[in-house]
Image: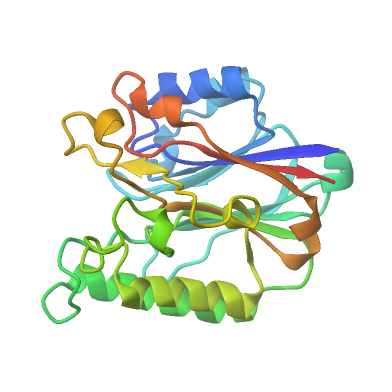
Amino acid sequence: MRLTVTSWNINSVRLRIDSVLRFLAEARPDVLCLQETKCPDDAFPLKAFRGSGYENVVFAGQKGYNGVAILSRFPLSTRAVMGFCERQDARHISAVLGPEAGAAAGIALHDFYVPAGGDVPDRALNPKFGHKLDFLAELRAWGGRRPSGPAILVGDLNVAPLEHDVWSHRQLLDVVSHTPVETQALETLRNEAGWIDSARLLIPEPEKIYTWWSYRSPDWAAANKGRRLDHAWVSPELAGTVRRVEVFRDARGWERPSDHAPVTLTLEL
């Protein structure tokens, strides 16, 4: 059985609902995990997604910022939301694929939106950066308690951990998302919990991988100054099933795009 799971920071699900529906029609992933939906639960466009064949949807939202959602062609069970840093700010949601998913039944899906961290990489000067580091520390502690069993973790983790996950390692060492304190924190928590970085499993360095291109660039495609902020990790039980990780770069060029592109993980179970 082939299972496809896509992660996409959509930067407002209502503003970009047409783009999401277009992607679902063209790519048809089994599961789509969204971040930064910027939508309170009572306004989530549930009807539109169910009309596109994604009957099974779980979400946690807030008005104007944050927000995560999982859309699935298969039934989902045991929905859960975790809070971090003593905040209930809709940065995580999880669910488990139900028995109808066949060989994928029982796989836990975790969808994360890690704080961006602001512009100044100094905890003392920038509380947002301190919040990000605290979030990563708590995520590390959670990873160590992760229940055994097959699991997939995806999301906008807002860290480009490796040298070739950014357009210029040297120039971005003091830029939030690629500072050593962030990259070390992310890689430490991933390694300690045993998560496998699917993209780098199949596409090792020095090949560049980007999933995000800034709105500030007048011609993002030509400049191609990207970063790999969006990730798809699998638990050790699933490492041997990873077949493909694809960045759907074309979506970054659609009308009124998100600054992130969808990232699709394909497993052969």
Which quadrant, please, contains the N terminus?
A: top right
The x and y percentages for residue 107 are 76, 54
Work out which residue is located at the far left of the displayed protein and give it.
125
Side (left or right) of 163 relative to 27: left
User: Is residue 255 placed above or below 37 in the rendered structure?
Assistant: above
Residue drawn at (81%, 54%) of the image: 106
On the image, which quarter does residue 233 sit in?
A: bottom right
Residue positioned 49% across, 50% down in the render: 207
Would residue 160 be seen by someone viewing this image from the given angle?
Answer: no
Residue drawn at point x = 53 percent, y = 81 percent: 141
Looking at the picture, tell me which residue is in the foreground, 33 or 261.
Answer: 261
Q: Quadrant of residue 190?
A: bottom right
- Counting from the top left corner in percent of width and height, residue 221 is at 30, 30
* Residue 90 spot, x, y in % from top left: 42, 56
Q: Residue at x 27, y 29 (%)?
A: 222
Image position of 60 with respect to 196: above or below: above
* Residue in the foreground of this view, choosing between 125 and 219: 219
